[in-house]
Amino acid sequence: MQSHFTIDCVIYSFTEGKLHVLLNERNEYPYKDWWALPGFFVEKDEEMEDAVKRILYEHTGLKDIFMEQLGAFAGVKRHPQGRIMTVAFSTIVKYNDVKSKIKPTTTYMRQARWFPIDQLPELAFDHAQIIQKSLQNLKYSLNYSTAIYELLPEKFTLTQLQQVYEAVLGSALDKRNFRKKIANTGFLKELPEVQKGVSYRAARLYKFDRRKFQKQLGID
Amino acid sequence: MQSHFTIDCVIYSFTEGKLHVLLNERNEYPYKDWWALPGFFVEKDEEMEDAVKRILYEHTGLKDIFMEQLGAFAGVKRHPQGRIMTVAFSTIVKYNDVKSKIKPTTTYMRQARWFPIDQLPELAFDHAQIIQKSLQNLKYSLNYSTAIYELLPEKFTLTQLQQVYEAVLGSALDKRNFRKKIANTGFLKELPEVQKGVSYRAARLYKFDRRKFQKQLGID
DNA sequence: TTTAATAGTGTAAAAAATACACACTATATT
DNA sequence: AATATAGTGTGTATTTTTTACACTATTAAA
């Protein structure tokens, strides 16, 4: 007898100064008409990571995904139809990379929508709990991981980066101290370009230098 | 159809200046005669945490256990008889609380033994990987959790505490700086007692003050 | 040219982390 | 009683990191 379980993805993106999570409106029981994390059963011979990629591709059209396992949720009563375990993943996409409007590709969901992290609807199953834990995790990993940069477009301003930090931490940061700290890491490469299309002083653009980040980790 | 999966426990204790892990020698296929993490199938209507308690009780006679979920391991090829998922937990017991010599209570294992973390035998399944991740996790949580104190007897000396830190981190710490740091946390209560039965100056005993720890966390 | 909106910058003070060495004490041994 | 042994317990100076804090510069639009 083999394992029979689902994957649920907390899919983050950042837009309009806020951290967002992608949710599905379910179109079947249980929890019909409720909002829920995108997820599905894992195929018999499918690696979990491939299932995550599959779900992400269906929802965002993207293939290279940042993902991190959050853990197993297997409460006996989490699913009305008997215990069905889910393994939750945190995933991150760049909002601007998500091509089309998201369309339901299955009959299981009615629609998909981005919700600001501080304005989530009521959620099916134990998904509220999963999101809470995922966010907690994201906070902790701010300092150790490249996650934060997955939320931004390839070229971004320091203000945008700070906004992402603030959105994840849920608190404001001092601009000068923040910039000093970021400068000290040395992970950013200053570009010879500035923001376009703004009606005020254009900000310089930066990009995350993955090579330098790797090196830094190596030394530690 | 319900989930069918196992729990595996990384059971830590600290003795003789070293971090130890409890392993079973398997007495059935697959991996007969190999060393493995204590674990078992989770019953149909059993919460995972209860399964962990059950396994810990069988192995150590203890009921109040520190535990933390490490995550799901579900590689399609991890189990020779088809994918069987395991959810791994890190657990900690105080070595001196483990009452009797550990006896196998099932036919599935031949013996159980504590291994120093740096002298593990070759391990069944993906258990080496699980232990590695668990240890990583333990390191990270040194600063955020009470885990470290679960490894020590109720009353302990500062030198013992330092040894635990060193065992987990795998590196030496400066005695004076360590004591300064610990003193700053304010989590320890100095007892009016000293060590007994040593042939040198007896060290003062301390105990972990859980109340103060909670308060500290509350403020942060 | 003025206004509105955001970009960009430095310094001083406080706190935390690090490096470092010797005297003390309880017991066991002679 | 003297001494050897083995681990306990302590302070200070230096460096690094974190925090607090406010004004000028630039651009586009009105």
Image: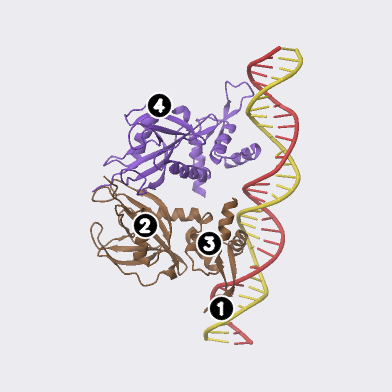
Chain colours: A brown, B purple, C red, D yellow
Q: Amino acid at mark 3?
A: Ala
Q: Which residue is mark 4?
A: B102
Question: Distance of mark 1 from mark 4, alpha carbons?
Answer: 72 Å
Question: Distance of mark 3 from mark 4, alpha carbons?
Answer: 53 Å
**Label 3: chain?**
A
The residue lying at 39 percent from left, 41 percent from top is B125
Closer mark to the observer between disc 3 and disc 4:
4
Quadrant position of residue B112: top left
Q: Which residue is mark 1?
A: A200
Left or right of A118 in this view: A122: left
Check the image and report above or below for B210 versus B110: below
The residue lying at 34 percent from left, 69 percent from top is A102
**Label 4: chain?**
B
Q: Earlier in the sequence, mark 2 or mark 1?
A: 2
Label count reads 4
Q: Which residue is mark 3?
A: A172
| Callout 3: SS | loop
